[in-house]
Image (cartoon, rainbow, N blue to C red):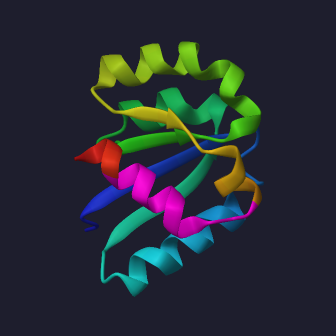
Amino acid sequence: MAEKTIMLACAAGMSTSMLVKKMQDAAKAAGKDYEIFATSTSDVDEKLASSNKPDVVLLGPQVSYMKKEIQAKTDAAGVPLDVINMMDYGMMKGDNVLKTAEALIS
């Protein structure tokens, strides 16, 4: 089982899948066993209610307008939330986004 679970949420869970790969590569290079996955914002409730809920949720910049709504859900579940930096997202800087997630978890 992974040390930490990081969930990225975007409109359809598709555009963040490339970033997930970059983050997985960065975690592996650092010797960390993380589960990192992307999902649609419509699946956030289900994921937060699961027995294997994420340790942190990061929103894609394109759905940052949903932060307040999703923040209420993550707060209720005791899971930190933030929006991925737009430059890191656009440049697919998986290492930077991984650092953001780790900072939120600790």
User: What residue is at 35 percent from the left and 81 percent from the top?
Assistant: 30
Q: Nearer the viewer, residue 55 or 96?
A: 96
* Residue 53 magenta-highlighted: no
Residue 52 visible in the snapshot: no
User: What residue is at 59 percent from the left and 44 percent from the top?
Assistant: 84
Q: State the image coordinates of residue 54 (x, y, percent, origin top left).
A: 37, 45
Q: Decide if residue 36 is on the left or right side of residue 84.
A: left
Q: Decide if residue 33 is on the left or right side of residue 92.
A: left
Residue 97 visible in the snapshot: yes
Q: Height in image: 30 above or below 9?
A: below
Q: Quadrant of the N terminus?
A: bottom left
Q: Nearer the viewer, residue 88 or 35?
A: 88
Looking at the image, the residue that sits furthest to the front is 87
Majority secondary structure in the magenta region: helix
User: What residue is at 36 percent from the left and 38 percent from the top?
Assistant: 50
* Occupied quadrant, residue 64: top right
Q: Nearer the viewer, residue 12 or 60?
A: 60
Q: State the image coordinates of residue 34 (x, y, percent, origin top left).
A: 35, 67
The magenta region covers 91-102
Q: Nearer the viewer, residue 44 or 4?
A: 4
User: What residue is at 44 percent from the left and 32 percent from the top?
Assistant: 81
Q: Height in image: 59 above or below 8?
A: above
Count all numbered tags in the image, as a single digit.
0
Q: Height in image: 21 above or below 47?
A: below
Q: State the image coordinates of residue 27 (x, y, percent, origin top left).
A: 41, 75
Q: State the image coordinates of residue 41 (x, y, percent, origin top left).
A: 64, 32
